[in-house]
Amino acid sequence: MIFLDYNATAPLRLEALEAVGEAVRCCGNPASQHGAGRAARRRVEAAHDAVRDLVGAPDGRVVLTASGTEADNLALDGIARRRREQAGTTTVVISAIEHPAIQAAADRLTRTGFEIRRVSVGRDGRLDLAALEKAVDADVALVSVMLANNETGVLQPVADVARHARQHGVPVHTDAVQAAGKIRVSMDELGVDALSLSAHKLGGPRGIGALVLRPGMQLEPLWHGGGQQDGLRSGTPAVPLAAGLAAAARAARRDLDQTATLASMRDELENGIYALPDAVPLGAAAARLPNTALVAFRNVQSNLLVDRLSDAGVMVSGGAACHADRVEASPVLLAMGVAAELAIGAVRLSLGSGTTPSDVARAVEKVRAAVEAVRFGI
Ligand code: PLP
């Protein structure tokens, strides 16, 4: 199998597997006073340290969640509601290309009286900074802009967003679920107040994520209960998954040294694929994650291409959602001004620590054959 779908989920790293296996055999609730409790607490604290280190937030406060989705919801909902209480602000600004975890959390806020401003992106997939600056003023409760887009890999100007928001005293959250572990991230340098990540995107176990908060950043919790994690997320933390997250975060940080190798394999892949008939690169004009390639083929429906490639042993993602009777183009691509007929032919190939040059060469050949097989109307 050639696995080129790291942005969907990365294979579990060996270090993470071992850490989960070891921790799962140990008993002890991190809230307990006895030795077993203290041992569990140390595992959780080690996860906090590894996360802080990975995202360049030496003083950050780490809240462990069940997923990147939960971290995003906690940030958006929790910060917006607290700000409304404290400052009476009821507007939230997000970009038009946020992951559904943010989009849907924002939609939910509208049902409780918030107004959502969605800021557009340019054809290159980058946030329109001038539009953002217009949208953010002192009446805004929170701004949330992702660090790297999951479909295109395009990096967003989060540091500029934070600089502008700070002038108006508005906190900024960034969804770094795709960026963390793929590029160097420094929360301090970005100047953001909250950042989400997810373990399974960096080779950790599925089922655990984290929200990292700047010291002093306040939010309303989503869950209420025993007051764990300083009351920010009640519920006994998943200690074995936290151990896996710690191991994966340390390994991902170490592997940042290999970013250039990854980028050169991605470029090699793109060179091969862009040369295929009717291939259209998407998002390639802006600074991007080193592992992501997005390409659309004219007269191709991506769900058919993904299935064909899967049958040929190559795992990729389609850029379109398939419903019973129709195929819908990706909202991210539509927001970038890509025509719907082209957007439905988009596939994303995302590489990672296990990808080899031979995977890349074989994948190009398999894509060539699969596109020929599924192309319609010519
Ligand atoms: N945010 C982004 C940018 C993502 O790509 C994803 C997952 O694809 C998420 C959030 C959600 O993360 P999780 O799968 O851990 O819920």
Image (cartoon, grey):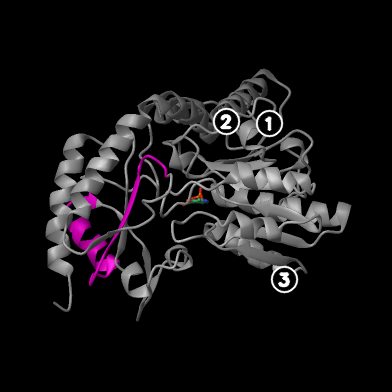
User: Is residue 355 toward the left or the right of residue 275 in the image?
Assistant: right
Q: Give SS at disc 2.
A: helix
Q: Percent from the top left, x then y, of residue 211?
A: 63, 41
Amino acid on which the number 1 mark rests in the picture: Gly
Residue picked out by circle 2: 51
Q: Percent from the top left, x then y, of residue 315?
A: 26, 51
Q: State how far apart marks 2 and 3 are (Cα).
A: 33 Å
Residue 26 can be seen, yes or no: yes
CA neighbours of label 2 inside 10 A, class few (<14), some (14 to 19), many (20+): many
Q: Give SS at disc 3.
A: loop
* First of labels 2, 3 by sequence position: 2
Q: State how far apart marks 2 and 1 are (Cα).
A: 9 Å
In the image, the residue with mark 1 has its CB under 8 Å from the nearest atom of ligand 1: no
Q: Give SS at disc 1.
A: loop
Residue picked out by circle 3: 111
In the displayed structure, 281 sits above or below 180; it is: below
In the image, the residue with mark 2 has its CB under 8 Å from the nearest atom of ligand 1: no
Q: Percent from the top left, x then y, of residue 189?
A: 62, 32
- The magenta-colored residue range is 288-314
- Near-viewer residue (72 or 11): 72
Residue in view at x 73 percent, y 52 percent: 78
Amino acid on which the number 2 mark rests in the picture: Val
Q: Is residue 375 found inside the magenta-colored segment of the image?
A: no
Residue picked out by circle 1: 60
Cβ atoms under marks 2 and 1 closer than 8 Å:
yes
The image quarter containing residue 276 is: bottom left
Q: Is residue 301 found inside the magenta-colored segment of the image?
A: yes
Amino acid on which the number 3 mark rests in the picture: Arg
User: Is residue 10 toward the left or the right of residue 107 in the image?
Assistant: left
